[in-house]
């Protein structure tokens, strides 16, 4: 499907630099060992071993570090003897000049999809309450069909330490908004709210934010879905949420954010490890 629909994880995409720095999309060329046996896909996180690029250990964290994002490679094809440029490295290439193209700036801003679990392919949602905190990455390998990574960040993985990524912002372009009508619950500190008017079969993932619509403006209630919900009736639907801070009332807008902008944490990028 065409963007902004996000139907699968696509890896880690450098899109900018923090602090208003000029982003030129610059890369660094680093060697890959002859006959290295593990595939590396476009958008994977990689690290260095004995001076050679290798796939990073997932999920990347302050323990499993990285030097940046794999953005393709080139090498002399051992069969044709011609220089070959490739979207991904398939593994076990018997060439002595394999060169990985790496986005290695530790200040780069990365766009990533959100999945429902570390090994899940289902797209989830990142809540507003995750902005400014850490998230963990997933553990899926990429696709030889597309050449793309399956890297993503994991919904409901907020942590105060050790996480590989710091959330900078949600991506508004791909957000999905659904209107409903408040029925009951939803008082301050409540952990459930009942709404009506949702479509049968609709899936609301963990991390979907709950807003009130007030005078045409969105007012965040401070709550987000703490459990996924599949709508099974045209009547009322009970949503399990984190503690409400502002009374849910009137017209309710449920906002899913399937993408985030993140930065590699200080201790997760090897250039920032003492």
Image (cartoon, rainbow, N blue to C red):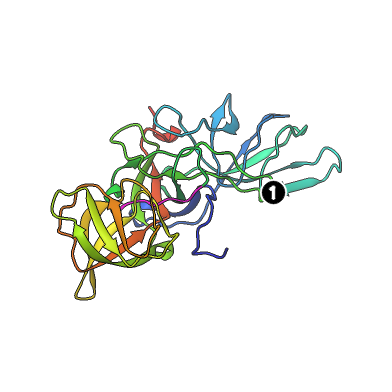
Would you say residue 204 sits in the magenta stretch? no
Q: Is residue 86 left or right of residue 181?
A: right
> How many labels, in total?
1
**Farthest residue, direction left:** 188
Answer with the quarter of the image where residue 172 lies. Answer: bottom left
Q: Quadrant of the C terminus?
A: top left
- Residue 173 coordinates in the image, percent (x, y): 42, 65
Question: Which residue is nearer to you in this view: 231 or 187?
Answer: 231
**Farthest residue, direction top:** 50
Answer with the quarter of the image where residue 153 lies. Answer: top left
Q: Main secondary structure of the magenta part?
A: loop
Which residue: 58% across, 39% down?
A: 141
Which residue: 64% across, 35% down?
A: 31
Q: Quadrant of the N terminus?
A: bottom right
Classify mark 1: helix, strand or loop.
Answer: loop
Answer with the quarter of the image where residue 89 lies. Answer: top right
**Farthest residue, direction bottom:** 215
- Report the magenta residues as a range: 122-127
Would you say residue 126 sits in the magenta stretch? yes
Q: Residues within 10 Å of mark 1 (few under 14, many from 20)?
A: few
List the residue tagged with mark 1: 145
Question: Which residue is nearer to you in this view: 35 or 209?
Answer: 209
- Residue 148 coordinates in the image, percent (x, y): 61, 48
- Residue 195 coordinates in the image, percent (x, y): 27, 61
Question: Which residue is nearer to you in this view: 114 or 108?
Answer: 114
- Residue 250 coordinates in the image, percent (x, y): 20, 69
**Farthest residue, direction right:** 80
Q: Is residue 7 left or right of residue 175?
A: right
């Amino acid at each position: 499907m065409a963007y902004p629909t996000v139907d699968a994880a696509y890896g880690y995409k450098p899109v900018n630099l923090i602090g208003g720095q000029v982003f030129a999309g610059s890369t660094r060329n680093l060697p890959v060992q002859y006959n290295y046996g593990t595939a590396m896909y476009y958008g994977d996180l990689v690290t260095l071993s004995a001076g050679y690029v290798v796939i990073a250990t997932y999920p990347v964290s302050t323990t499993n570090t990285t030097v940046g994002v794999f953005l393709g490679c080139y090498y002399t094809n051992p069969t044709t003897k011609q220089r070959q440029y490739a979207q991904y490295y398939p593994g076990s290439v018997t060439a002595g000049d394999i060169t990985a193209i790496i986005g290695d700036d530790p200040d780069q801003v990365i766009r990533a999809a959100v999945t429902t679990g570390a090994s899940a392919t289902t797209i989830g949602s990142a809540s507003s309450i995750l902005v400014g905190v850490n998230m963990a990455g997933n553990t899926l390998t990429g696709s030889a069909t597309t050449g793309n990574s399956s890297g993503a960040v994991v919904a409901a993985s907020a942590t105060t330490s050790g996480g590989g990524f710091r959330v900078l912002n949600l991506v508004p372009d791909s957000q999905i908004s659904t209107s409903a009508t408040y029925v009951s619950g939803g008082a301050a500190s409540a952990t459930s709210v009942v709404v009506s008017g949702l479509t049968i079969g609709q899936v609301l993932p963990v991390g979907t934010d709950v807003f009130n619509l007030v005078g045409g403006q969105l007012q965040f209630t401070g709550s987000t879905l703490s459990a996924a919900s599949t709508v099974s009736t045209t009547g009322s639907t009970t949503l399990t949420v984190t503690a409400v801070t502002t009374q849910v009332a009137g017209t309710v807008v449920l906002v899913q954010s399937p993408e985030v902008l993140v930065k590699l944490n200080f201790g997760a990028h090897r250039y920032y490890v003492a």
